[in-house]
Image: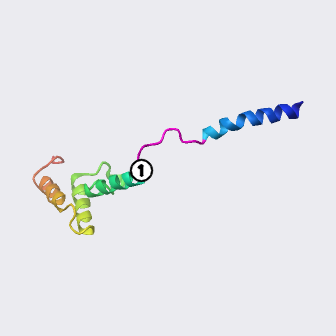
Amino acid sequence: MKLLTAIAVAALSLPFGANAFAQSNPSGLTRADVMAQLQQAQAEGLVPAPNSDYPPTDAEIARNREIYAIQHGGEGAGAVKTAEAQVAGGGVGAN
């Protein structure tokens, strides 16, 4: 009798256990979407930001934009000039 009860409990618990590993709420973002967001953040100078400099300062963002422009052959060069003008002209981070 105990064996029959154990088999019945095991058989009934299998469908519930399988649902625990199913992804019922997908994030909605594809790999391509995430890669595009990462590339945009790099172009804006927000990535990489070291742990000791979070949130990144205006100078760090300008430096990251310049590095991105150099690495990608001038893509985002206008953004670099804008950031340099804000930092030099007392933009958002000026004290």
The percent coordinates of residue 37 (x first, y second) are 33, 52
Q: Nearer the viewer, residue 87 or 12?
A: 12
Image vertical order of residue 36 relative to residue 15, above or below: below
Which quadrant of the view contains residue 2? top right
Q: Residue at x 15, y 58 (%)?
A: 84
Which quadrant of the view contains residue 9? top right
Left or right of 1, for residue 58: left
Q: Secondary structure at mark 1?
A: loop
Image vertical order of residue 8 relative to residue 60, above or below: above
How packed mark 1 is, by other alpha carbons closer than 10 Å (few <14, some 14-19, many 20 or more), is few
The percent coordinates of residue 95 (x first, y second) are 15, 46
Q: Residue at x 38, y 52 (%)?
A: 34
Residue 25 is covered by the magenta coloring: yes
What's the magenta region?
Answer: 21-30
Q: Residue at x 47, y 42 (%)?
A: 26
Which quadrant of the view contains residue 68? bottom left
Left or right of 85, for residue 42: right
The percent coordinates of residue 11 (x first, y second) are 76, 36
Residue 27 is covered by the magenta coloring: yes
Left or right of 18, for residue 38: left
Q: Residue at x 61, y 38 (%)?
A: 19
Q: Nearer the viewer, residue 11 or 58?
A: 11
Q: Amino acid at mark 1?
A: Thr
Which residue is disc 1 drawn over? 30
Give the quadrant of the N terminus: top right
Instruction: Tell me the chief SS of the magenta region.
Output: loop
Image vertical order of residue 93 relative to residue 63, above or below: above
Q: Residue furthest right?
A: 1
The percent coordinates of residue 36 (x first, y second) are 33, 54
